[in-house]
Amino acid sequence: MSYGVLGSKSGHLLVETLTGSAETPSDAAFDRFQTVWGATWVPGRLTLTALHLTFMPNRVGRGAAMLKLDLRDLTGVELGGGVVQRTVGLRTPGHVGRLRCLGAPALAEQVAALADAARHAPPRPPRRRTGTPGAAAPIRGVPRLSGP
């Protein structure tokens, strides 16, 4: 799967808590986001890749409170009502994030398709480290020196 950006939208995000415990890493991310911003509509930019959904708030001073969700953790994508700006509900086991934006129906379809594809993708194998810890990798074209 590619990590390239598949979509980006400006909008407002509101996080609602359904249960008190964080079951997934995305629920923990929702908890951290809600601790900083509370229950308010937060303006920002949503960026969508094949594996993650990232929301970066507009306010400069709170850049540490960005939200990054793993699409495999989404249990549902909902389309809410509205006349001009509709909402896209991003449901996890413990939270619902509501994104209010223009073009919400197309975004909801795209997120649902990517979340379904991410859930059915084979898990990635763990990274293997080569060599000894702390040893510098040899530089090409430079002979190794040995001895004192």
Image (cartoon, rainbow, N blue to C red):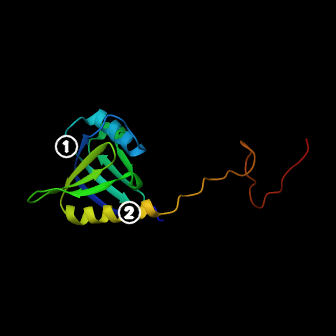
Q: Which corner quadrant of the image does residue 15 belong to? A: top left
Specify the label residue 7 is tagged with.
none
Asked whether residue 4 is in view, the answer is: no
Relative height, residue 26 to residue 80 (above, below): above
For the point 23% across and 49% down, which residue is it?
Answer: 98
**Residue 101: x, y in percent?**
19, 56
Q: Amino acid at mark 1?
A: Trp
- The answer to whether marks 2 and 1 mark residues whose Cβ atoms lie closer than 8 Å is no
Quarter of the image where one finds residue 37: top left
Residue 33: image x %, image y %? 32, 39
The residue nearer to you, when weighing 11 against 124, is: 124
* Residue 54 drawn at (x, y percent): 35, 51
Q: Residue furthest right?
A: 147
- Residue visible at 33% across and 56% down in the picture: 47
For label 1, the residue is 41
Callout 2, which amino acid?
Asp
Give left or right: position of 145 versus 32.
right
- Name the residue nearer the viewer: 100 or 138: 100
Q: Residue placed at 20% from the left, 61% from the top? A: 104
Query: In percent of the image, x 24 and y 34: which residue is there?
Result: 38
Say which of marks 2 and 1 sits in front: 2
Image-based side of 41 in relation to 94, left or right: left
- Badge 2 marks a residue whose secondary structure is helix
User: Where, quadrant-wise, is the C terminus in this rendering?
Assistant: top right
Q: Where residue 111 sits: x, y (%)?
A: 32, 61
At numbered mark 1, what does the secondary structure look like: helix, strand or loop?
loop
Quarter assignment of residue 109: bottom left
| Residue that lies at the very extreme toward the left in this rendered image | 83
Mark 1 neighbour class, 10 Å CA radius: few under 14, some 14 to 19, many 20 or more: some
Q: Which residue, given by chain and number where applicable, does mark 2 sit on?
A: 116
Q: Is residue 21 visible?
A: yes
Instruction: Tell me which label, 2 or 1, sits earlier in the chain.
Output: 1
